[in-house]
Amino acid sequence: MTAMRCTSVLVLSFSLLAVVPAHTQVTPHLRTLPKVLTGVANSPTGANIFFGRSRCLFQCWFDGSNLRAGIVTSLGLKENRTAGTLQHKLEIVMSSSTAGFTMSQTFAQNLGATPTTFFTMKTISLPAVNTVGPNQSGTWFAGDRPFIFSGPNLIIQWDIQTSTSFGTLGTRTMDGLYQTSTVPLNGTIGTSCGAASLTSSYDTSSSSLVYTANNLQPSTPTILLLGFDSAFFAGAIRLPFDLGPLGFTGCTLDVDPIFTFVMAPVTTTASRVSLPIPVPAGSTYPIHAQAMFTDASKPSGFGTSNATWSMIGNVGLVNYMYNWSRDGATAQYGPYAVNSTVTHFLKP
């Protein structure tokens, strides 16, 4: 394999991004926690039903790498099944926290001295959830006061007090993540603007992340774009970004490319590259990739594939803990020894 910082095509194309205006036909992904799941249809593991409880206290921790400093005005949860309307009495508290991944079992200690009551305790009606997918929340919670995230890490605490007793209420479930295994997770987002498709997998025998591009034109060059973000290009431009004005008709940029790799042909219509990336101890590497392939139908002569995401490792990124059938200052369950969370959306 050959690694490059960029190809001549990428130099030309990406240098133009700064002068090409945004295009309304491509809608940027919602800002997502955990960030690695930006634009993902459904998390690969886990779900949580705390909206389906009549009473509970649920506290989520996010490593600061998941978001940048700034203001949060609205908060949503990614729900993953259709459900009917529901009434809840709840409060949302947020905090820029010094707590680490292991957290404290004491809720107040994780919140620290200056938490923000983002959404004051009140009864609200949750609308029905009719469809599920990427960038969709059944309900948005507009903050009664904005929350300013300053780091190093983030706590979001949901306090549901719909009833004085603990029990089941409704069937609404949230998209979630619970990484019981150290085997890296992989998935796809977006679509290709041609026939080519990209997949990622992890070869445990060689500790390598393997990318395969299929349905290529016979014996044509393919470049892998690799980075660590599917939310922003160069830290400023929201993704996905419309590449049509650059001659990539119908194509989008779905990752922030830091490195490029030449993919070696394995058949006349498929190429592959294997990158040695051992599973880290005590952290998780979020990795995003997209392929650029020869396509004579595009003015630029190139097209882009769907994107892939990978989580190498299963600790250090997100965590949660909760009281499920009791009240109290300390958690009944959690915090956990592996990445565990419910998928959140943030605005602005």
Image (cartoon, rainbow, N blue to C red):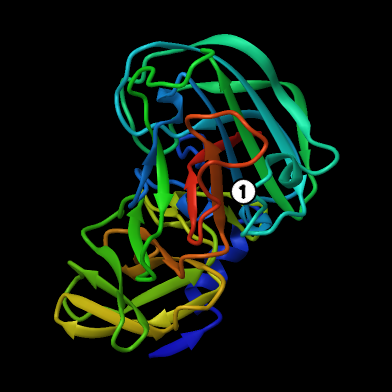
SS label for mark 1 = strand
Left or right, 14 with respect to 273, comes to right
Residue drawn at x 48%, y 37% is: 27
Foreground pick, 75 / 153: 153
Kindly indicate the quadrant of the structure image that contains residue 103. bottom right
For the question of whether residue 31 can be seen, the reply is no
- Tag 1 residue: 61
Residue 197, position as x, y percentages in the image: 25, 62
Foreground pick, 139 / 121: 121
Crowd band around label 1 with a 10 angstrom C-alpha radius: few (<14), some (14–19), many (20+): many
Residue 88, position as x, y percentages in the image: 51, 14
Residue drawn at x 16%, y 75% is: 269
**Vertical order, 58 against 221 (above or below):** above
Kindly indicate the quadrant of the structure image that contains residue 268. bottom left
Residue 25, position as x, y percentages in the image: 45, 35
Residue 37, position as x, y percentages in the image: 46, 51
For the question of whether residue 130 can be seen, the reply is yes
Residue drawn at x 64%, y 20% is: 142
Foreground pick, 231 / 5: 231
